[in-house]
Image (cartoon, rainbow, N blue to C red):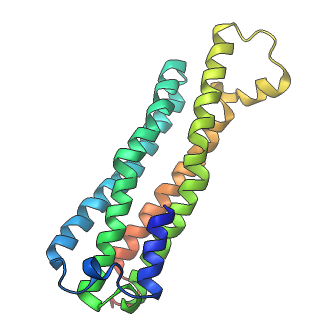
Amino acid sequence: MSLVSAFILMNNFVGPWPQWLMSQGSVHERVWFTLHMLGGMLFGGGIVLTTAIEYMVAQNKNESVLSFWFDKVPLLDAAIVLPGLTLAMVSGTGLTAAHYGGLGLAPVHIQIVFYTLVAFAIWWAVTDLTTQGSALEAVNEWSVSTAAGNGGDDDATKEEKKDGVPDVVLRRTVSNVVSCLFVLALYAIMVLKPGTLHY
């Protein structure tokens, strides 16, 4: 995420970079457009789908299902969401080079999309990626204590298990919903192009 953010900032404030890839005509505009559509599909679809699955997993309240999900969700992020986000941002930057001569010269609504993507990446890294491991640990501990009959739970542990799942799992639902709102905002900006369309 740091490298992709640095790539965007370089292209916005310095100019098309790297020059051999981002200069006008180095890659056909339709190639950039195809890659942009594929990246957006993987990124947006991955976020919405994993949010829906994680909500169903949390509502299921089955220890083995929860443990399996939090063990595999980093793999889904690494295989689908992160490559999709990277592809969307790089190809989108290529499109701005093809259409406008660079990201820094693109209309405001396009720059807003990239800043929103950077904000999403920060949000996702801070609230989602950092809690995947702790959620798995909490689920495993919860599973062990449940198997032991919950004997000796103190008040804090009982509070953490409200609604039948560890509290960190419930907090992740908020992070996931906000991530989906980011996706909605991004697509709305790209489609509605505020400031350019007249109704």
- The total number of labels drawn is 0
Answer above or below: position of 141 versus 18.
Answer: above
Q: Is residue 158 left or right of residue 107?
A: right
Seen at 51% across and 64% down, the residue is: 2
Question: Residue 78, percent across and down?
Answer: 40, 46
Answer above or below: position of 76 versus 91.
Answer: above
Question: Residue 129, percent across and down?
Answer: 55, 47
Q: Is residue 159 left or right of residue 168?
A: right
Seen at 84% across and 24% down, the residue is: 155
Q: Is residue 27 left or right of residue 77?
A: left
Seen at 33% across and 70% down, the residue is: 90
Q: Nearer the viewer, residue 54 or 8?
A: 8
Answer above or below: position of 182 versus 198.
Answer: above
Question: Residue 145, percent across and down?
Answer: 69, 14
Q: Nearer the viewer, residue 84 or 170?
A: 84
Question: Residue 135, percent across and down?
Answer: 60, 34
- The quarter in which the C terminus is drawn is bottom left
Seen at 77% across and 9% down, the residue is: 151
Q: Nearer the viewer, residue 44 or 135?
A: 135
Q: Is residue 65 left or right of residue 169?
A: left
